[in-house]
Image (cartoon, rainbow, N blue to C red):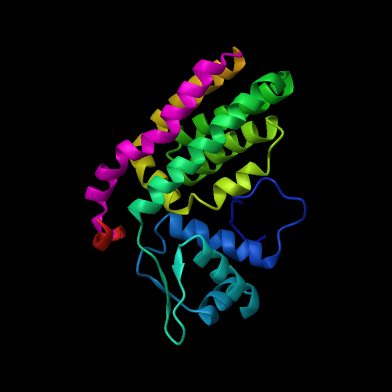
Amino acid sequence: MIEGLKSLTFDRARPPSVTDQVYEELYVRIMKLVLPPGAKLSEAEVAGQMGVSRQPVRDAFYRLSQVKLLMIRPQRATVVTPISIEAVYEAIFVRTALEMETVRAAIPNLDAARLGALEDLLERQRKAVAADDRETFHMYDDRFHFTICEAAGHAHVWTLIQNHKAHMDRIRYLSLENGAGFALEEHLRIFDRLAARDEAGALDEMRQHLQRIGTKLEGVRAAHAECFDLEAS
């Protein structure tokens, strides 16, 4: 795997390909605004930086364009897209609909081993909050939600969620500047309701948690206006 890369994908039936690794590395750079909206990318430069051939970079660019993080322009530079408010709200809707069902399906399957796995992830999140490590917190945040999908017997649902949440991830990362501790508290409340087999309570906590990003959207946009698609406002 490309050095330093923390994988975004947990449900792997095979080792990651070179294209997977390039895709995930670029995804993380875009999420963290190392590659901000408007940044120009070239296949040759990225291939040289990562020590790979141009074909996996070309394939990764295409995949990133499909989740609307890159705009590929023939005969011109490929650019990182601005954050789309419309895409963020669409992601919130899709993710909430899918994860509410995984919560329902997971509760009967939450044995001691699965609850222990969730507790371990919460402890890792605590350490990331204490270290002010947003990237690691974001990774274990995603793994917490994936583990619930997995407990539901629907790990593949995480792939569907990933395909819709790219713009949402940039908002999530920016909101963690001051909100990682609060997100952890919400995860703890979700866990408590899951452990108590309280379906109604777990659903309510999960809904509030996933939709909270919408309440932070205007504040994030005010603080980082240069990252957004102002023409769509």
Task: Left or right? Give the position of 160 relative to 166.
Answer: right
Task: Left or right? Give the position of 147 relative to 92.
Answer: right
Q: Nearer the viewer, residue 34 or 98?
A: 98
Q: Position of residue 182 (x, y in %)?
A: 39, 29
Q: Residue furthest right?
A: 14
Q: Nearer the viewer, residue 65 or 170?
A: 65
Q: Compared to 210, does 83 lie above or below?
A: below
Residue at the (38%, 40%) spot, across then down: 176
- Residue 206 is inside the magenta segment: yes
In which quadrant is the C terminus drawn?
bottom left
Residue at the (60%, 65%) spot, across then down: 22
Would residue 141 be seen by someone viewing this image from the given angle?
Answer: yes
Count how many numbered circles sit on residues in the image: 0
In which quadrant is the N terminus drawn?
bottom right
Would residue 184 be seen by someone viewing this image from the given angle?
Answer: no
Residue at the (61%, 79%) spot, across then down: 54
Q: Residue furthest left?
A: 222
Q: Position of residue 196 (x, y in %)?
A: 59, 12
- Residue 170 is inside the magenta segment: no
Task: Left or right? Give the position of 93 relative to 155.
Answer: left
Residue at the (49%, 49%) spot, across then down: 165
Q: Compared to 99, does 43 lie above or below?
A: below
Is the stretch drawn in magenta largely helix, strand or loop?
Answer: helix
Q: Which residues are magenta?
A: 197-226
Task: Left or right? Give the position of 148 relative to 136.
Answer: right
Q: Position of residue 180 (x, y in %)?
A: 41, 35
